[in-house]
Image (cartoon, helix red, strand yellow):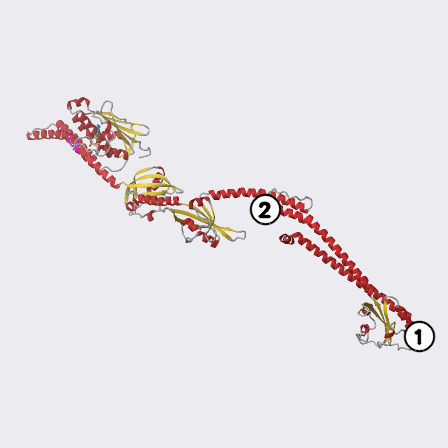
Amino acid sequence: MLAQFREFCQSLSSRLIFFVGLTLLISFSTWAYYNIRYQKQKEIKDISVWTDRLSETIQLGMQYAMMQNSRDDITHSIRNIAKLKPIEHIRIYNKEGVIKFSNLQNEINQKTNIRAEACYICHKTTPPMTDLKLSERVRIIDSAREGHRQLGVITPIRNEPGCSTDSCHIHPPDKKVLGALDVVVSLKESDDEATFFEDAVIAFSSFVFVVTSTIIFFFILRFVRQPIQKLIEGTRKITDGDYQTQMDIAPGNELGQLVASFQKMGKEIGLKQAELNTQRDRYQQLFEQVPCQITVQDRDYRLVQYNREFCERFHPETGDYCYRAYKGRDGKCENCPVEKTFEDGFSHYSEETAINRDGSRNHWLVRTSPIRDGGGNIVAAMEMSVDITRSKELEAKLAASEKKYYAIFNNIPNPVFVLDAATLEILDCNESVKSVYGYTRDEIVSNAFLDLFNEDEREYYAFKLQTASVLHHVRHITRRRAALLVNIRISASEYPGRKVLLITTSDETKRLEQEQQIIQASKMATLGEMATGVAHELNQPLSVIKTASNFFMKKVKRHEPIPDEILLTLSTEIDNHVDRATKIITHMRQFGRKAENTSEKIQVNDILKSAFEIFSQQLKVRGIDVLWKLDEDIPCIMADANRLEQVVINLLLNARDAIDEKYQDRRQLKNMGRITLKTSADTKNVGIVISDTGIGIPPDKLDKIFEPFFTTKKVGKGTGLGLSITYSIVKEYQGDIRAVNNDDGGATFIITFPLAPEDTP
Ligand code: ADP
């Protein structure tokens, strides 16, 4: 009950009632006060004026009697007039303050103190004032003796001309005032009236105040308090989530409109709230389902909130601390990003490592951000952790693999360069570059790869590096300006963000030297093999020369003349055979010399013929036929004549041996041993076919015969190098060689070379 009353006292309605009532009370009181005061003043003023007029009337009425100095008339008049209500006293004072006339007999001739109330009005100054306004001449006497108030008006009695000039009792003319008339009237009646009026006004005011207050009270109660109560109830329901609540207030007035607005607002809030709820649910879902751990922490690192992922991963206890849940620590971590966020209000990153209960390690990428209240103060910090253990492991693996790659890259015995595909600038290289070229990595990186080439060849190789995949026998220059013969392998690749060329160079200088030596050794072996045939070849001219010289010696000893004709014939014969022997020896010497690693435009027919020339005797003594099928208009190829001759001789040697082996009974050779030499060409290639009627190649050995040191020949006869050298020479000139068995026995070797470019001189 008391609480309700207190609530009512605090309510807007009660305050409104109180203040309206107070305002009314003050208004009515003020109105009553001024009204009563005005009435009282007016009454006093009216009585004053009336008394003043009465005084003047008395003066006028008694003027004649005074002139006559008829004291009885004056006394009689005063007494009669004083009987009139509400007159109580009429006194006439002389100048000295002696009451000369009065309606009260006992006062006559009493001297009044000049300082007394009635006299003091004029005598407060010296000389006394003569011209005073009525209000100054009026005095109110609170007569205790009479029991009511009185009003006195004192009026000076002036020295009229009649008084100063008349013969009866002359007053000097300079005397302005002769005395004073004091008329005192009772205020009892007027005070009673005023009291009655005052009571009436107070009663009326109280009545109006009470009635007005009551009306306002009930009005406020009915039209303000009740609707507001309903409005409060309605808004409470809206606050509690009942956005569709109906407030039973009649529309129309301002409160009705306010209620309608509240209801509309409630509905809109309801809609917005529903939307907010949807969004909140969505964010909550995101918060819960986001594949990382999210926590909200207070300044003590206590977990205020966390998502499902965190809960499932760390199983925190209620009120747990971040450091305990994450790492099982008893205090905060060093360099705590949450602490920093609380300090400076910014986001912070860090990488954390935690040891799990099973002893395994987990790495986390942590990011924090502040959560502020409406005033901008940081009240909490949000920490988001992403498990980067897997990527850390991959990073470590990548680093290890990068290290391994670098180790491999650097330990590749051949120099490897990484070039920018567009500019051919060296982006990277391995350590073999130092041992082969003499440049350290720092010296050569960022330089142009073309700087390693001869100046006049740079333009050509700039194009070749962009288009070819292999470049043979390229001349490079080392740091010490030494020449280097290299093969270059080029492959296009991608570095992060740019296209590159991976270049591998192999120093061919030593290999070529060794190859030359092997080829040379093989040549020497071939020459050795051919020695018998060559000796047989040389034997013929020598025997001709011997026969001719014996003939000449015999003729000279016998002193027989030699006819000029015979001398000429024999000399010519000797000359021809010496030429032939010289040619054979020159050819053998040429074949035996170390071939240059060059290439020039040559005709394969010439090579076949030349090879056959030094080999023909070998075949002739074995009775092996040679069948020529040459295309006489054959186009040129690019190769070295000496090297190509070695190829043909190797193949002829093998053909000879194969026929030898097949036809060991020499008598059969007459008809069966045959080597066919054929050349042909199409638009791209020139072909050389050397076919024999020998033992052929076992099918399972067809893919092995070009391998070095493969031989089926007897120890001391075959080295197994012939076809391998043949193969490498053919490949050197971009050619191809293959072997097949003939259908009717024997083997065929088919060699193809690309045509020489037409613009080659
Ligand atoms: P070598 O002649 O020293 O054995 P090659 O490399 O020249 O070495 O030959 C390798 C092998 O290839 C020979 O041992 C032989 O078995 C086989 N061969 C080569 N040419 C012929 C041929 N025309 N007919 C049959 N076999 C051949």
Q: Is residue 530 magenta?
A: yes
Where 87 falls versus 715 (above or below)?
below
Local secondary structure at mark 1:
loop
Q: Is residue 686 left or right of residue 228?
A: left
Q: Identify the residue under disc 1.
A: 68
Magenta extent: 528-532
Q: Is residue 157 left or right of residue 1?
A: right
Q: The disc labelled 2 sits on which kind of residue?
A: Thr
Q: Could you tell me if the residues under marks 2 and 1 are in contact, i.e. CB atoms within 8 Å?
A: no
Q: Position of residue 424 (x, y in %)?
A: 36, 43
Q: Which residue does the image show at 31% across and 41% down from the upper left?
A: 504
Between the C-alphas of marks 2 and 1, the distance is 103 Å
Q: Earlier in the sequence, mark 2 or mark 1?
A: 1
Where 624 falls versus 88 (above or below)?
above
Q: Identify the residue under disc 2.
A: 239
Q: Is residue 249 magenta?
A: no
Q: Nearer the viewer, residue 348 or 745?
A: 348
